[in-house]
Every structure is written in structure tokens, then in C-alpha cells.
Amino acid sequence: MNKFELSPLNVAFKKHLSNPVFDRKKPLFIVGVSGGPDSMALLYLLHRHDFNPVVVHCNYGLRGEQSDKDQRMVEQVCMLWNLECVSVKPERDTSETGNFQLWARKERYRIFRELKKEFEAQYILTAHHQDDQIETILQKILRGAGISALTGIDAFRGDLFRPLLEVTKAQILEFVQVFNIPYRIDVSNEESTYARNFLRNRWFPLLEDLFPGWRTNILSLSEKAAVHQDLIEIAADKIRHDRRSFRRSSFNSLKDNLKPVLFKALFDKAFKKENLNKGFLENIQTLEELHTGQSVDISVKFKLYRDRDLYYFLSKSDSEKILTETELKKEDLVNGFRVNNISITTDSAPKTMNSSELVLDIGKVKFPITIRNWESGDLFKPFGMRGTQLVSDHLTNRKVASHRKNKALVMESFDGMIAAVIFPPEKERVQPGTISENVRVGKSTQQIIKIEIIQ
């Protein structure tokens, strides 16, 4: 094998390319290229492996003519290697006074994703390397992050792909020298203005002298954090009832120091990328005082509701009713009527019944029908029963949670008969509701009303 094949960068790159996440041999990449040694090394790897990525260069103009020279070099290399290059000059609103690096990062990834959509690319590539990983973990430690947060940067996360995470900055610098890859140095990186540069320029040289092997030790934290997170998920699974609820008795029996950690794991599973109220977590023991039917705010957007031995995560809009009243003629159902995730249509009588559908004999229903929220005192004759039952009791018997009951609907015939009770939408529920015994399909049924869940 030649030098290129044996280089640490090529070995790491080829290993990642064998990952089954790639759905075809030559996916189209969007690759961010600043012109520094890291991104130019990544671009060279793509070129050597005959990829044709869309190269994106963001020129923030911070260094005047030097920034323009970075852009020209990237464009010239792309022209030489016959690669598509898009240079962008993001403009920041002059009224913004926050962290420039944070703004620049958000703007950069916004541009990447717009171009990914435009070019129908599969992944966005960046040249993050092992030193970046160490800096990320160290910053999290210094900012007081929990153990689970020390997992660092992932090589794959969503549409982001970082194939150089296992190689060091020193290996990258050696690579660009050996293969004569052009690059430019951003002198601002030699300053200690920002947190990463401070760690890189002041701490790292001292740590090399004082604590040999410290890099390996920091990186091992990422592996330990992943194990810690796996253990949390195992424990959370034991008390989870479904994605948005968990067992009260199991949770309350936990040690006090475990409750905030597991509560957050349960919440994160229910609502990704949402934040909890820190004050609530600090006073989580008060949950034991919550009675059935009561709820407590856990963030600006969410609350926790207790129903007997279950706690439910709810968005604050969940308590709102979803329909007031809709009147439908027979012809309104020909093309179908939809409410929430329920479809109501007319059809010919089926030969066999499907458990995921409700089927009513249309000849036993008087039009116009009304679809409305159920009300206290509503009675109907459930399928298979001789007598009548309150809709509220029926919902309880069918194990519809208290906080969901107000989203149940009824189909009322023009003569006042409740022809069907439609349960509130839930992914776990197969049958959309219960029909009345008065509208059951018989041998003489010619046409039906069909109620089904829309997946």
C-alpha cells in the first residue's frame, strides 16, 4: 500500500464510508470548507476517493483581505479538482450584540441545510477532529454539564457526518504537508479571544507537560458517559408505561437523587429538543403530593398530569377541546370528512370486518349527523350491550385516561341518538371507538359509514 492508503486520515475515512447509514455507494455530500488545514484535508480525501461534493465556503469578512484570500484559494482548488463551489458572505444584523461565534455557527448550518435541500444531498460533512472533541468535552465539564452530556460529538448525527473525529490535529497537519495540500491559517485562531482558543493555546501546552496521557483520559469520559446514558435508559424503561407516561409507584420508590435524572430521561424521550424547568427538577419530590386529576407545570410549554398510578406528560394545549360541532349531510361523506387523525366516509357493506375500523349501517342513521365533543349526561347503547351507558363511563371502562377524555367525540344522528363514540387519537390504540348497538351492520346492510384511523 502507498502512503495515502496507510495514512490515519484515509483509514478513518474509509472505515466510516463502510457504515450502513449510506444508502448508496456515492452519496452526494455538502462539505463545509473554510480553507484551513482540517477542511482542506477532508476535501482532498473526498477528491482522492472520486466524490463530487458541493463545497460551501462562508466568508464572514472578519479579516478583510485575508478572508477574501481564503475564499479565492478554496474556489481555485475546487476549479482545479472540478468540484462545485458555493461561496457565501453571511451578513449579521447590526442590532445583534450576542456571541458572534454562536451566530456564525447557526448561520453556517442554516446555509448548509438550504443547499443540502437545493442539491438533494444526503449528508453535510464537517472536518471536526479529535482535538475538537477534547475541547468540547472540556468545555462541558467546565460549564457544569452532567455525566450524560459528556458524550461529546458524534461522527453521525442526523444528516451530519464528521469522518475525522478519530484523527488528531497533528496528524492532519502532517497529512497536508506530505501530500502538498494547499491551506491557509486563520491567525485569529492563534489568539485566545474565545473559549476554544483559550483552551487550545494556553491550557493544552501546559497539560501536555503536567499530565502525560491526559488526552486519552478526557476521551475515555465520552465512552463512560455513553455507558452511563445506557444505564439511565434501562432504568427509565422499567418505569415507563408508554412514550408519554410512566408509573407513579415505580417512580416514587426511586432514591431522591435518581428522580431528577430519570425524570429528564423520560421527558426527553417524550419531547425531543425541549427544555425542562430547572426549578421543577430541584423540587421534584413534590410530585408525591399530586392527587389524581391534578397537574403541575414542568416547563413553559408542558405539564405533568396524574391519573391514578400513572403520570402523563402533556403539552399545555392538550387540555383544549379540538372540535365544537360540525353538521354533515350524507353527500359530505362521499369524499370523506377528517377530524384529528380520524376519517369518516361512506362505502359499500364489507364482506369482512376490520378491527381498526368502525362500521355503521347508514340506513339506521338519520341525516344530517353531528360530530361534536361529548357532554356530561350523554347516553348511548354500546355495541353488544342491552342497556345504555354514559359516554363518560364508557370512556373510563375503555381505559381512556382522564386528561384525554375531553378530546373524545360523538357522532349524533338527527333524531338525537348517539351512533358512535370516537376515542381521542392515540398511536397505541388500534380501534377508533365504539358504535351503538342500534346501528350495527346486518345481512341486509347495503351501505355503511366507515370510521378509521389515518396513519
Image (spheres, rainbow, N blue to C red):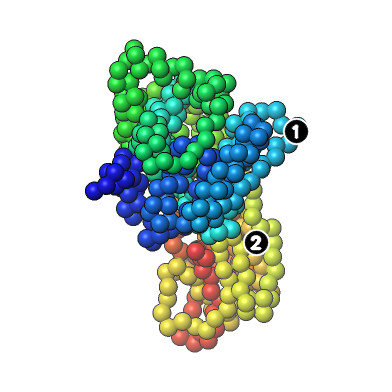
| Residue appearing at x 38%, y 54% in the figure | 49
N-term mark: 1 or 2: 1
Circle nearer the viewer, 1 or 2: 1
- 138 is higher (above) or lower (below) than 5: above
Q: Position of residue 376 (x, y in %)?
A: 62, 53
* Residue type at numbered disc 1: Thr
Residue 206, quarter of picture: top left
Q: Nearer the viewer, residue 437 or 98?
A: 98
* Residue 94 disc label: 1
In this view, the residue in front, 134 or 278, is 134
Q: On the image, numbered disc 2 is attached to which residue? A: 372
Which residue is at 37% across, 34% downward?
A: 174
At x 31% / y 40%, what residue is drawn? 8
Confirm or deny contact between disc 1 and disc 2 (CB under 8 A): no
**Residue 432 x/y as whole percent:** 50, 63
**Quarter of the view holding residue 379:** bottom right
Q: Is residue 263 visible?
A: no
Helix, strand or loop at mark 2: strand
Height in image: 351 above or below 434? below
